[in-house]
């Protein structure tokens, strides 16, 4: 019954719809991007498991809207660097947005983590090439009341495949204020379902500071 519950939650998150964010690329004015995902986790050492049921589950919802050709409004819901639930609204502005070469953008976000207020500045770099892209997206989650800061950096290499599919190789790194730094490897493949919807399937493997492994499924929508 527990496993059926996890599947139901996964389907719900897909209908509602962490990884195709614009990063350093601004969202075109008047357009939307939404992604919803569910990640289920287990210990890497399955000999310590007492059940095949997942020991972790977290859902994520990410939304972007192009307020103008340069200003992007967003909402980021899910799990923070520290592992607590987050709700962050943000604005992003490009520092360099030329047709060729490096792209760069800054971001400022406000919201809550574990129901405590936070400020989240961020910085993104991106480089597109004929068959793919490279990006680095970093944020600092500063607790207004706690005066503590958590750091996160996602480094992504994307490759466009045949039939509009995409291969994504991502390294997720973080330095929580109250826990050791961590790094996770998160590869995934994106499949088009129709002109607006794409399905993402992948996995997560803790490299250091994280002993979990996981499976991820999500849905992207652009309109």
Image: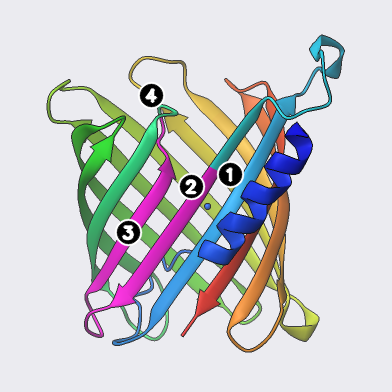
- Dot 2 and dot 4 residues touching (CB under 8 Å): no
Of residues 114 and 203, which is closer to you in this image? 114
- Distance between mark 1 and mark 3 Cα atoms: 22 Å
Dot 4: within a 10 Å radius of its alpha carbon, few (fewer than 14), some, or many (20 or more) residues? many
Pointer 2 or 4: first along the chain = 2
- Distance between mark 2 and mark 1 Cα atoms: 6 Å
Q: Which residue is mark 4?
A: 176
What stretch of residues is rendered in magenta? 59-81
User: On screen, 179 above or below 93?
Assistant: above
**Helix, strand or loop: magenta stretch:** strand
Q: Which residue is mark 3?
A: 75
Pointer 4 or 3: first along the chain = 3
Q: Label for residue 171?
A: 1
- Distance between mark 2 and mark 4 Cα atoms: 14 Å
Q: Which residue is mark 2?
A: 154
**Mark 4 residue element:** loop
Q: Mark 1 or mark 3, which is nearer to you?
A: 3
- Distance between mark 4 and mark 3 Cα atoms: 21 Å
What residue is rendered at 68% in x and 26% in y?
212
What residue is rendered at 46% in x and 64% in y?
21
What residue is rendered at 53% in x and 45% in y?
59
């Amino acid at each position: 019954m527990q496993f059926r519950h996890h599947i139901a939650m996964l389907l719900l998150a897909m209908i509602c719809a962490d990884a195709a964010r614009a990063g350093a690329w601004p969202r075109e004015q008047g357009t939307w991007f939404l992604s919803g995902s569910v990640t289920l986790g287990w210990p890497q050492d399955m000999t310590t498991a007492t059940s095949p049921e997942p020991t972790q589950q977290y859902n994520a919802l990410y939304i972007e809207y192009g307020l103008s050709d340069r200003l992007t409004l967003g909402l980021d819901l899910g799990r923070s660097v520290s592992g607590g639930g987050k709700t962050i609204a943000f604005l992003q502005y490009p520092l360099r947005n030329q047709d060729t070469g490096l792209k760069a953008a800054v971001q400022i976000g406000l919201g809550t983590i574990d129901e405590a207020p936070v400020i989240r500045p961020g910085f993104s770099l991106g480089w597109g090439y004929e068959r793919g892209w490279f990006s680095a997206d970093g944020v600092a989650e500063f607790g207004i009341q706690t005066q503590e800061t958590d750091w996160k950096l996602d480094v992504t290499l994307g490759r466009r495949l045949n039939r509009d599919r995409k291969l994504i190789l991502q390294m997720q790194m973080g330095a929580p204020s109250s826990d050791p730094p961590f790094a996770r490897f998160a590869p995934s493949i994106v499949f088009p379902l129709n002109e607006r919807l794409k399905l993402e399937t992948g996995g997560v493997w803790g490299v250091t500071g994280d002993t979990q492994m996981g499976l991820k499924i999500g849905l992207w929508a652009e309109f």
